[in-house]
Image: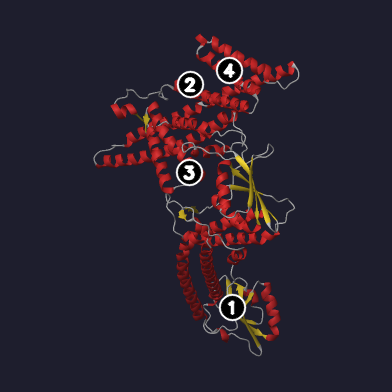
Amino acid sequence: MLVPMKRLTLIALHGDKDGIMSALQDISAVQIISSKTAESDNSSFEEIFSGFEEGIRRFREVHNSIKDYAKKPGMLTPKREVEKSLLGSQRTIDKAVDASIKIESQIALLSELKAKHSQVLSFANTLKPWLKLQQNIEDIKSTRHTEVFCAFIPDNKISQLSELPVTIVVVDNEAKNTPCIIACHKSDYDDVVVKMHEVGAVEFTFQKDLKGNVIKIYDALLSKANAIELEIEQEKQEFEKMGCESDKLLLAIDALNVEYERQKAKAELLVSNSAFILDGWARSDEVERIQKTISEVTDAFFIDFADPKDDETPPTVVKNNKFNAPFEAITNMFSLPNYRGIDATPLMAPFYLLFFGLMLSDSGYGLVLYILCTLYLKLKKPKGTFAGIVQVIAWGGLVTIVCGFLVGTFFGLSWNKLFFGTAEGPFPLLFDPLKNTISMMLFCCGLGVVQMMFALGLNAYMQVKSGDTQAAIFDSVSWIFLVLGLIGIAAVPNYSAPFMVLALIGGLLILFFAGREKKNIFGRLGSGAGALYGVSGYLGDTVSYSRIFAMGLVTGAMGEVFNLLGSMLAGAGTGVMSIFTTLFAIVVLVVLHGFSLFINTLGSFSHTARLQYVEFFGKFYATGGIAFKPLGYHVKHVDIEQDYTNLHLRTKNEILRFLIKPKKP
């Protein structure tokens, strides 16, 4: 059912603003509406907002750097439950800041060591071509009359320098760019350099402070690089140990988001020097709770709860019992109901389960599906939309068990063979899709007609409720008469007279009144004739329900084929081989039936939803609802254990002090 909404207006003293906003966030019952105009100045909040954004960004970046080393929760491990007080405690932020400083320092140290390691290796690589140099580096120097220098000369160009007045000593003739020592008279140096550049030679200069044998220097550099690499590995191990800080960072991210949400809500208030005005939406069944919550903070306030005006669009809130509530996830995937429409969830739920069960239609699959989904719900404890979907599939598994009796299958096997050991018996209780295909298909289409007529009846009810009785008769009831009349004529031709009358009444109502907004009779008849063509759409919608039969047929056929394959493998060969083939057949059957369960569950879920969205909702459901988003504790990484006294971050300055990244000394 749709919960009526109230427009809340609260006026209170400026000094009570923080306490009231904290209390409202604690009960998560009021959606704040901005009281400010487009020209309002929010500059006073910009520093706060940027501080929160920076803090959240910082914690998220630090967490991303260590998340690979954090303890991975199991597939069925629920989120960590924390007291609500931790989301408002300054100590939560303090711990995350301390962890961030420690992790960032370790990251900086590792980066410094890696840069140093790279620098040492790069230096060593520059010396590698000169390892065969016999002289010490300091001995390669110019004299008063002679210029001595080093260079790399392409191996096929050395001969071109032979005509110059130079002495070339090849250090390593196996290198492509040959390292050489070149000596010439100082007066010839400029000409030698020009010629060397022409042949592609590149000069090389050892560092000024470098002395000794090149091999020893190179080995020392490698030893230093190895020592740095060992230090890097040790620091990496220390860094990996910091994965345990992940929970602190995630909790702090949620805590900052909670506080950030409240600060943004405060920015929407209309504030003076002494008072403030809060506008918002609240559920009608939360009025007393809201009043009590505010009165516990202060007794100096004015509050008013008014019904929505006709030109206002309140957010949509639905309230259903324990059975129907999970199906809200299915409805919301299509669209929230319009506030002035109808909640289709309880009306759709029985059809959804029935169609799902008939599509999957195997008792064995239904049993496994129910067990797996129930275990997941109990152990993982999911929340929100996904929890609703899993619960719907679990109940769909129960209905599938029953439908398996109706069509007579259990993991692709006949119930008759399982119970009586024969091919004949009381099963299936309804139809065997593989043998009675036409009967099963007509049965499924008949269920579709029932659902569509129910949808038209709902549409008529909504039209009468809104005061448009003519629309209920001419646009809804007329189609019920026409469609049921045509079906009756086709189904029982020997007793078609009453159905012909019913179809005639429906057809005439549509012909003369579908275009009742037209001013002349010819316009009305033209519109009515065009509307009558819509009967083909109902025929297409009816045939669309044959997908229920098709999906059930596929499930049964796949199960039978897999069982046939397993029976061919089991016991093949003789002696020990027959044991191995039997075990292999069991593994193959488990894998194949697991695949069949997955793919057919997915198909049943999506095709059943499609029938609700197109053939059912399309005939009466008013979409376009706006989600109700009250100020509250909207967390992502943890679950809230229970309510405790609020311990919110204390002041704006204190918040910002802990969000600003401290500078390193």
Query: Could you classify mark 4 by the number of other residues whose Cα lies within 10 Å: few (under 14), some (14-19), or many (20 or more)?
Result: many
- Numbered circle sitting on residue 481: 4
Which residue is label 1 attached to?
180
Disc with the residue nearer the chain's start (4 vs 3):
3
Which residue is label 3 attached to?
387
Q: Is residue 297 above or below residue 459?
A: below
Q: As shown in the figure, which amino acid type bears the numbered disc 1?
A: Cys
Residue at 56 percent of width and 33 percent of height: 613
Foreground mark, 2 or 4, reads 4
Q: As shown in the figure, which amino acid type bears the numbered disc 3?
A: Ala
Foreground mark, 1 or 3, reads 3
Which residue is label 2 attached to?
442
Query: Could you classify mark 3 by the number of other residues whose Cα lies within 10 Å: few (under 14), some (14-19), or many (20 or more)?
Result: some
Question: x%, y% of residue 248?
Answer: 49, 61
Label pair 1/3, CB-CB below 8 angstroms: no
Label pair 4/3, CB-CB below 8 angstroms: no
Q: Could you give the CA–CA distance between mark 1 and mark 4, rounded to whole angstroms? A: 104 Å
Q: As shown in the figure, which amino acid type bears the numbered disc 4?
A: Phe
Query: Could you classify mark 2 by the number of other residues whose Cα lies within 10 Å: few (under 14), some (14-19), or many (20 or more)?
Result: some
